[in-house]
Amino acid sequence: MAFECQESIEVCLVKNSIDSGEQQAGLSEFNSNFNHITSNFDAKSQLETETEHRESGVVCLLRNSIEEQAGLSHFSPDSDHNTLIHDSGKSQSEIEVGIQKPSPSNPKVNDTSGHYRRLITDLPSALISEILNCLDPKELGVVSCVSTVLNRLASEHSVWKDFYCERWGAPVVSGFSDEKSWRELFVEREFRSKTFRGRFSIDVLYGHTEAVRAVFLLASAKLIFTSGYDSIVRMWDMEEGLSIACSRPLGCTIRAVAADKKLLLVGGSDGFIHCWRAVEGLSCLFDLVGSQNLSTEFRIWEHEGPVTCLALDIKRIYSGSWDMTVRIWDRSSFKVVKVLRHTDWVWGLVPRDTTVASTSGSDVYVWDTDSGTLLTIISNAHVGNAYALARSHTGDFLFTGGEDGAIHMFEVMSDCMERNVLEVSTWSPHSGPVHSLAFEFPWLVSASADGRMSLIDVRKLLQTCKPSLGKNVSKVRHMDHKSVEPPQRMLHGFGCNLFSVDIGADRIVCGGEEGVVRIWNFSQALEAEQRARALRGIRLENRMRRRRLQIELTSKGSRTDQCSVAAKKNPINGDRSGVWHNKRGMSGRMKA
């Protein structure tokens, strides 16, 4: 299990709270070095004349000073769990070293410029905010345990919202961010992302009479939509695994499904896109079984071939087809506003912000959705067709799966108007074509014709660094392809030809040629780890209580005196002429 980081951090917290003297000494050194950095410029002039070189230097020295000199060597460098470290409860006076102002008794502090030693908290709040904005989640957690002031600044910083949205997008439950801080949301979601290494249960959903070609998991509404060769769209309850509703036969194979809380789309092999609008007041959102009402159920036509992929955002609809085009629709009018032409059949597409990535034949394209211009192309990404495509929420990373059974990871780097593409890693976990990919940070899941699914943790390949001053900074940790770890998990036991897969916070949904839908439920692992974490918290609290009592008794000296008197009366290696030793000797002689 990958949940050991939280316990190690809790233990470090106890150790830091006990060894306050060592921490004060370390912080004293940290303040001394940091004063040397900040003593050469005034706060006001710093904000006005700050340059890129100074900012990067301050950030670099801040990181090194905090990690090496602030007494935080207890934290494991191997921990990749980016959890915020809570303050140990010490007051500001107990942790921080005070400002040393010039005085006659301390002439070394005086200098010709009149500057004196300062803490990082003496800097303007705007400058501190900019420094914290350049740290990643792990570094921000380290900073938060230095003092109560930095803990408050780091915990309430708006960068936690950016961290969350970069990895998982906006929270799926509306108003949820108002109940919890963004830091708490980040820590909770990071914890949930580790459940895919734990135990799981499998729910098998029966209903389709032929192969399932498309599955879609709408986590915000806890619904699953599936369809395939039987031309029927089915809606399932994600929690219970029960069928809620099914549509009438649509007349052809359904190869693509996409949905949000307001619109459900399916793409048919006849070239149409069938749409359902959400019905207000309906718990399952869409009325699939009702009579065809043009206000809630309708079709749009534009493609001249089978529709193979669909996607939605707030303003647009994206559709790809074997007519070698990707069409961008206005969501309010359902009219085509852009046509992106390719050189081969379009197999997959994923939009992000103002760009959309697509696969056509063996190539991968990245387009600008506003102008319709081609930004970059990855030629011959696979040997054969590139069937599957997935993308990170920021759009910087592309994952492709192809007919050759390989999975590639690419980084798209922006440089003015150009896009440079770098291949990061390659996996070959399958013996057949990869038909579908889905990504939910940090897990990439693939479905293949060999009847297996692979789970790949890409966390070690990524570095969540924020760009500095508008310049693009590579977020990828470049590694030799031979040193890349294989998939962390392989799921077996299915028939051949898995066609579609999707992933949520703690579930994986897959459909294939068998005509059944399988749900891998990892919520049991989450519940087990939550119980284990609660027990670890209780044990930690008990250890802290015992340690405090021991310190109190030692400080009073009463217990020490009693123990010393007892030790003098009964020495362990002293005179052996006592009664007990005599009895032992007598029994030995009697036996002899």
Image: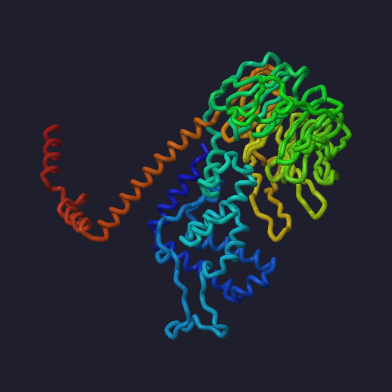
Tell me the quarter of the picture where residue 264 sits. Answer: top right
Q: Quadrant for the C terminus, please.
A: top left
Q: Position of residue 329 (x, y in %)?
A: 79, 37
**In the rendered image, the vertical position of residue 21 relative to residue 381, given as above or below:** below
* Residue 212 percent across, percent down from the top left: 70, 20
- Identified at 84% across, 43% down, the residue is 372
Question: Considering depth in this image, is 107 or 340 the residue closer to the camera?
Answer: 340
In the picture, measured across the screen, residue 574 lies left or right of residue 96, that is left
Colour approach in the figure: rainbow
Q: To which quarter of the image does residue 356 belong?
A: top right
Query: Relative to 431, does residue 351 appear above or below in the rendering?
Result: below
Dividing the picture into quadrants, the one containing residue 459 is: top right
Is residue 371 left or right of 314 when viewed as pictured?
right
Residue at position x 70%, y 17% in the image = 248
558 over 251 or under it: above or below: below
Q: Residue 96: give x, y in percent of width and height.
A: 45, 66
Q: Is residue 270 visible?
A: yes
- Tell which residue pokes out farthest to the right in this image: 343
Residue farthest to the top? 209
Q: How many marks?
A: 0
* Residue 294 picture location, percent across and down: 74, 26
Q: Which of 30 and 585 lies nearest the eye of the viewer?
A: 30
- Residue 451 seen anywhere in this rendered image of the structure: no
